[in-house]
Image (cartoon, grey):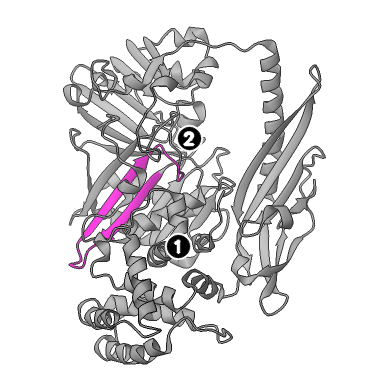
Amino acid sequence: MLEPGKRILYIDALRPPSDYQLSWGIGTTYSLELETLLSVPLAFSLYECKNQKEILNNSIFALDAIRRNASKLVIFCQHGQIKVSSTDSLLYSYLEDMIVEVNPSSGGVFHPKIWLLKFKNQEGNILYKYICLSRNITFDRSWDTILVLDGKTVEYEVPENDNLIKFVNFLPKIAVNKIEKNRLDIIKKISIELGNIKFNPPENFDNQFKFHFLGIDNNDSFPISNEYRRLLIVSPFLSESVLNRFEKVKQKYLISIQNSLDKISDDTLKKYNKIWVLDELAEDKSEDDISRLSGLHTKLYIGENEKSVTLWNGSSNATYAGFSSQNVEALVELRGERNKIGINKFIDEKSENSIVNFLKEYGKTTLDEEEKEKENLEKELEKKLEGYKANLLKMGLRMKIKSESKELYKIIIYPNITNSRYSSKEIKGICYPITLQKKTNKKVILPLWKDKIIFHKVPLLSLTSLVAFELNIKDKDKDKDKEISQKIEFVLNLPVKGMPERRNDKIIRAILRDSSGFIQYLRILLIENQNIFLFNHNIINHGKDDYGKQQNRIPMPLAEELIKALSRNPDKIKNINDLIKELSKNKDIKEDIIPEEFKEMWKNIWRTYKNQYGKRK
C-alpha cells in the first residue's frame, strides 16, 4: 500500500475477476481522452493492450469489446473537458451514447474520479468494485493513487453506502443534455442494489471506512480534522486557506509541485516541518516507456495520532474549491494502525520503496520582471478564452443531420440559446466534427454565434455527435514587441437529431472490410472462454489464413465451434445473430461481407437455437 514499487495500472484495476463479466458500470472524471475511453471496454473483455496505438491498429478486437460492453457503461465528465484526439478511429462513434457531460449548479467543476462496477459469473454470483482515483480517464503518466474496494451482496441493509447511493442518484440531475433511457436504467439498478452491497477495505485497514462526496448537497463540513499529532498532505494544487486550517497539528509535511508552492506565502510554508517536490532527476526510470511516470497528480491526506491513522484518498486538491463543496469531489476515508500504515511508511528515507526517493526538498524560485509580465499576459489571455468558452457552453449547441444524396449528408450545428451578450473580436474560433480533417473542413465561429453552421457532403462513416472546437487569441508584449498567443481545444458531445440507423452497420463493414474479416470476427466471438482471453495477434492471422486457403469456403473448425457454442454457450449464438441482423439492415450493399455458404449454415444453427431457447431474451 502506498509504495511506488507496488504499482497498479489503471486498466488493471478495471479488469473483472476470473470467470466474471461486466454487468453494468458507472465512471466519473473531470477530463476525458477518447483514446483512453476506447481502452476501457478492452479491459472488461481482458484484451491486453499496451497503448492507444495498439488499440486503434487492432480494431476488430476493439470492435468486439466495445459491442459487448459499451452499452453497459455510462461515463460522466465535466462539460467541455473532452480532449481533442490526436488520432482518428471509426470506433469513436460507439462512445457517443456512453458519454454524459455534466455541469454542477454550484459554480464549481465536476471533479470526482471513481468507477462503480458490477460483475456477474455464470452461476449468478455478483461482485462489485468501487475504485477511487486521483486520475482522470486519460493516458496521463503522472503519479496517482488508486484505491480498490471489493463488494459482495449481503442480506441486510448497509448504511455505510448511503452517501454512495446519494451520489449515484445525484449524477443525472446535473447532466447538460438528456440521458438515454438505458443509461438511466443502469444508474437506477445500481442505486437500488447498493443498499445491500458490503464493501471491504484493503489490507491493513479496518472496517471503519467512509465514502465522502462534496458538492452534492449543502453540507460544507470539512472532512479532515485538525486534531491530529502529525499530518501529511500530498496535493499538486494548494491554497492558503486550506494549508492554514491545521494550526493545532504539531508536525506537518507537504508534497506538492514547484509552481503551486511558489504561490504560497513564506509565513504559511514555515508552518510545515518539511516540504518536498518531485525531483526530475530521480523520477521513475522504468524500462517500459508506457509505464514510466513523471509529474504529480496524487491527492492524499494522512492524519496520525499515537496509535491510529486516518487516510483520505480521492480527487480533492488542498484548495478552497476542493474542500468547500464548490466542486463536486469524491474521497474515501480509511483507518488503521500507525505501525502498519503511518506517515513514516510513506516518507521513510531508508526504505527503497519510499516515495521520498523520487522527491527533493522544496526551494522557492523567483521570476524576473520580464517573466512575470509574460506570465500575467498569458493568464489574462487564457482568462478571456475561458470566458468565451463558458459563453459557448451556455448556448446549448445542438446538431441535426439531413440527407443530401444517397451516401452524403449535411451536419447542421446551431445554438439553442442566442441571446448571449458576450463578444470578443480578439478571439478566433473554429469547429469541425472529429471525424473530418481540420485543415479542409473547419468552419469559423463568429464572435457572436447566432446562426447555424453547416458541413456539407459528409460521408455516412464520418457522421458523429462529437465536435471539436479550437479558440485562439493573440496579443503583443508592449515592452518587447513580441506576439504572445494562447489556445484552448475541446470536444463537445452534442445532442443530435436525424442520425441514420445504418451508420453502425457501415462502421462494422468498414472495420471487417470483407468476408475474411467477418470470419476472423466470428472466431473471436466463439473463443471458448472469452473471460480469460488475452490479446493475441495469432488469432487474427490464423483466421485469415484458414479462410484464404479454403478459397471462400467456411473452415470446418468454425462450423464445429458454432455447434459447440449452441450447446455450451447459447448467448454467443444470440450475439452472432445480433451482428448478422446489424449487417443485414442495409439492402443497398453491393458486396455482402457475409459469405453465402455461411448464411445457409446459419439458417440451421439459428432455427435450432429458436427451437431450444426461443423464450430466451
Label located before the other in sequence (1 or 2): 1
SS at badge 1:
helix
**Picture disc at residue 325:** 2
Magenta highlight on residue 121: yes
Please report the bounds of the magenta region as a residue range. 114-139
Q: Position of residue 244 (x, y in %)?
A: 45, 15
Q: Is residue 55 above or below residue 384?
A: below
Residue at coordinates 80% horizontally, 39% vertically from top-left? 424
Judge the density around disc 2: few (<14), some (14-19), many (≥20) Cα neighbours within 10 Å: many
Residue at coordinates 39% horizontally, 15% vertically from top-left? 360
Q: Position of residue 484 (x, y in %)?
A: 74, 28
Residue 252 falls in image quadrant: top left
* Left or right: 326 in relation to 425: left
Seen from the viewer's position, the closer of residues 157 and 333 is 333
Q: Position of residue 113 (x, y in %)?
A: 42, 42
Residue at coordinates 66% horizontally, 42% vertically from top-left? 390
Placement of the N terminus among the 4 image quadrants:
top left
Judge the density around disc 1: few (<14), some (14-19), many (≥20) Cα neighbours within 10 Å: some
**Picture disc at residue 59:** 1
Report if residue 365 is visible in the image. yes
Report if residue 171 is visible in the image. no
SS at badge 2:
loop
